[in-house]
């Protein structure tokens, strides 16, 4: 479970002496929701090792545009400590493990899991004592000994900390969020301590632990963001690196099933997320999976299903952004606003130039070298041995870069932003025309553009960050959409919309009045040979409901899918949370999942049954419709007196399906003139 608000201090408990301290129990939801993360062993190690697990999940993080690790990926269902303290090629168990990951990737969750496993006895053969220091939350003195640190982090100890440390070799020290300490690790070797009771300046005491001059037999687990890795590497010796890459494809589904107690809700929520490829790809980041599940759980509280869920990808991104900024100091909002402007400029120029890696000089020239903000959005890749270039940076995920690139075009500022890559104009029309002509890779950036100019986004940015979104951008987007399809229609033909992206853009904005204005000049919808995912159908349904002048719907050769092909083939394979580890569900579970899916054209027919609809012609040739669609079509015939022509060529309706159609034809409300 990825819980951002948890800052509990784990208090150690000894296997040999239980009265030394007490260990607060984790909430049941932590155990229920914990999902194994995909990790890469020793990313960027000074020794150049690539000691990855051979049974790694092939659906690793980089497939979805996240993660910069160079080791092999593993997402085996083992204990957290087994994954972190796995012996290297030499057979030796590492004494120092550095857990690297961007914000929201699950570093603190892994630490909590280690503590839980130790308390439950999994680790007690390896460590007698585990001391965890939450560097983000604990207030440390300016001077302290190692014993003082133990007492500070574990105030319930009934035996002096110094006595615990005397002669103990099987101790694990955990430093969670090491970058939050913010002091220099360049300390004189001669001044380092070798006595755990010796009081020294805090920096010297901690460096003494890191460099093993005190308690050399103790083990260390350090969690750190990639941007703080450079100075730490220069301080450690013999360390092993583990990078968190997030959730693999299989683990994403498992997380959804662990989050929702009812399997039916888990299936529904995951189908919703998987149907939206951008959102599903972003769920590789654990905190994004948590954000999506939290939002969908709220939606399901008020509805029986998610077919009417209006939460767009941009809105999910806004909530993700609020999670990243949750614990930031808000005393100086101007600093954040200026930083976001510069960040958006960097993202946009990178998208234009197909650039995802940025050199350290570019970061500094843009004014982004701010340790309190930079690690929230960019990962740093430390050069390995023999590499002569400096550090390079990348956004946590490609879609996050595209989100900030879109934001560049709509945020108001006092002048042109200049970065190391040159001057980039805030010309929305240039972006849209480039996308229209040749740059189809800008699709997601344009889609986020529509989401950002929605009234919800404008209010959110103003309220939470203090940044203003330009109202002019809405007008430019409306004019572009209307002109885009006029240019595709031949003279004398009815004005039609024939590209799916238009419906995606309007659904992303999710505003009834904007959709009505954008579609008001068009009378026909014409899509051919298109695989319509659940997300496509939701977008179509939204637009059709707000399209007053729609007279003809032609979906020739289109197919309707409620989940992707891989999920359909794998429908009988459960998550471990549903059927137990590695088991197969019984027949009832498979039947239940299949029965929950409505007929393929349910959303389309529901949208077309609007009372004020002007629909006259519905063409569904070569859509391979089955008997399951006939009840919906019969209801449409009965409730839509304006429908004059229905074409169902090349469909396997069957005798019972045709009987259902006949019931609709016999209805008093049916005025159909042509059935093909």
Image (cartoon, rainbow, N blue to C red):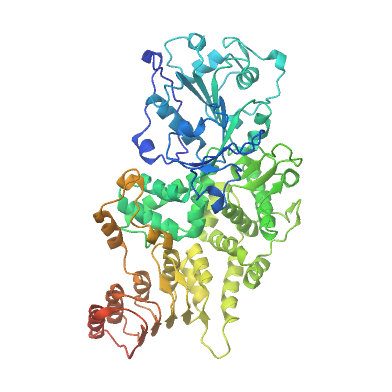
**Image quadrant containing the C terminus:** bottom left
Whether 86 is drawn above or below 419: the answer is above
43 on left or right of 24: right
Whether 244 is drawn above or below 587: the answer is above
**Picture coordinates of residue 594, whole percent (x, y):** 30, 61
Res. 220 image quadrant: top right
Whether 65 is drawn above or below 491: the answer is above
| Extreme residue toward the front, this view | 90
Picture mark count:
0
In the depicted view, which residue is nearer to us: 349 or 661?
661
- Residue at 38%, 36% (x, y): give it: 30
342 on left or right of 305: right
In the depicted view, which residue is nearer to us: 191 or 545?
191
397 on left or right of 124: right
Res. 417 image quadrant: bottom right
**Picture coordinates of residue 602, whole percent (x, y):** 34, 70
Whether 381 is drawn above or below 460: the answer is above
Q: Is residue 456 visible?
A: no
Q: Is residue 293 visible?
A: yes
**Picture coordinates of residue 129, whole percent (x, y):** 46, 19
- Residue at 46%, 21% (x, y): give it: 127
**Picture coordinates of residue 412, whole percent (x, y):** 65, 56
**Image quadrant containing the N terminus:** top left
């Amino acid at each position: 479970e990825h819980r951002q608000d948890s800052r509990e201090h784990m208090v150690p408990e000894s296997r040999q002496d239980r009265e030394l301290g007490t260990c607060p129990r984790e909430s049941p939801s932590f155990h229920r929701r914990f999902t194994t993360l995909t990790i890469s062993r020793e990313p960027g190690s000074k020794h150049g090792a690539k000691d990855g697990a051979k049974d790694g999940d092939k659906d690793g993080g980089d497939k979805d545009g996240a993660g910069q690790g160079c080791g092999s990926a593993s997402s085996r269902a083992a204990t957290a400590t087994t994954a972190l303290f796995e012996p290297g090629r030499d057979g030796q168990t590492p004494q120092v493990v550095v857990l690297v990951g961007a914000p929201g990737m699950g570093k603190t969750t892994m630490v909590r899991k280690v503590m839980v496993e130790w308390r439950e006895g999994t680790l007690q053969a390896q460590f007698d004592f585990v001391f965890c220091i939450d560097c983000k939350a604990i207030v440390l003195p300016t001077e302290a000994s190692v014993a003082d640190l133990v007492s500070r982090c574990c105030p319930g100890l009934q035996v002096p900390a110094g006595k615990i440390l005397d002669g103990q070799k099987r101790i694990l020290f955990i430093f969670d969020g090491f970058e939050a300490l913010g002091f220099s690790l360049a300390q004189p070797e001669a001044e380092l301590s070798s006595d755990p009771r010796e009081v020294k300046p805090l920096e010297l005491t901690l460096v003494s632990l890191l460099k093993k001059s005190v308690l050399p037999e103790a083990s260390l687990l350090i969690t750190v963001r990639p941007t703080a890795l450079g100075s730490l590497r220069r301080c450690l010796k013999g360390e092993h690196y583990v990078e968190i890459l997030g959730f693999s494809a299989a683990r994403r589904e498992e997380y959804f099933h662990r989050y929702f107690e009812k399997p039916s809700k888990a299936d529904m929520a995951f189908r919703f997320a998987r149907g939206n490829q951008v959102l599903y790809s972003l769920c590789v980041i654990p905190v994004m999976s948590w954000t999506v599940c939290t939002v969908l759980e709220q939606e399901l509280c008020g509805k029986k299903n998610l077919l009417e869920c209006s939460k767009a990808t941009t809105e999910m991104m806004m909530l993700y952004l609020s999670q990243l900024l949750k614990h930031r100091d808000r005393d100086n909002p101007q600093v954040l606003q200026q930083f976001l402007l510069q960040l958006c400029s960097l993202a946009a120029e990178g998208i234009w130039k197909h650039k995802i890696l940025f050199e350290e000089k570019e970061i500094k020239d843009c004014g982004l070298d701010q340790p309190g903000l930079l690690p929230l959005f960019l990962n740093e890749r430390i050069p390995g041995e023999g590499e002569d270039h400096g550090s390079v940076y990348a956004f946590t995920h490609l879609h996050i870069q595209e989100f900030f690139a879109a934001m560049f075009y709509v945020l108001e500022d006092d002048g042109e932003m200049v970065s190391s890559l040159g001057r980039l104009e805030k010309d929305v029309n240039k972006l849209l025309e480039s996308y229209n002509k040749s740059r189809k890779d800008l699709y997601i950036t344009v889609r986020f553009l529509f989401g950002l100019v929605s009234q919800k986004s404008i209010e959110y940015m103003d309220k939470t960050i203090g940044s203003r979104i330009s109202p002019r951008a809405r007008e430019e987007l409306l004019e572009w959409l209307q002109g885009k399809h006029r240019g595709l229609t031949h003279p004398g033909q009815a004005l039609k919309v024939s590209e799916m992206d238009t419906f995606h853009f309007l659904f992303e904005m999710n505003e009834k009045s904007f959709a009505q204005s954008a579609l008001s000049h068009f009378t026909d919808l014409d899509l051919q040979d298109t695989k319509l995912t659940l997300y496509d159908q939701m977008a179509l349904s939204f637009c059709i409901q707000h399209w007053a002048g729609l007279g003809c719907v032609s979906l020739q050769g289109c197919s309707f899918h409620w989940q992707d092909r891989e999920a359909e083939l794998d429908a009988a394979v459960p998550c471990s949370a549903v059927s137990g580890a590695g088991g197969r569900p019984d027949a009832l579970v498979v039947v239940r999942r299949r029965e929950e899916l409505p007929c393929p054209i349910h959303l389309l027919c529901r949208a077309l049954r609007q009372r004020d609809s002007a629909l006259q012609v519905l063409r569904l040739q070569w859509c391979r419709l089955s008997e399951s669609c006939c009840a919906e079509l019969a209801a449409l015939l009965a409730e839509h007196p304006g429908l004059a022509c229905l074409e169902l060529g090349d469909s396997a309706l069957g005798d019972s399906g045709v009987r259902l159609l006949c019931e609709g034809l016999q209805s008093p409300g049916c005025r159909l003139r042509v059935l093909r």
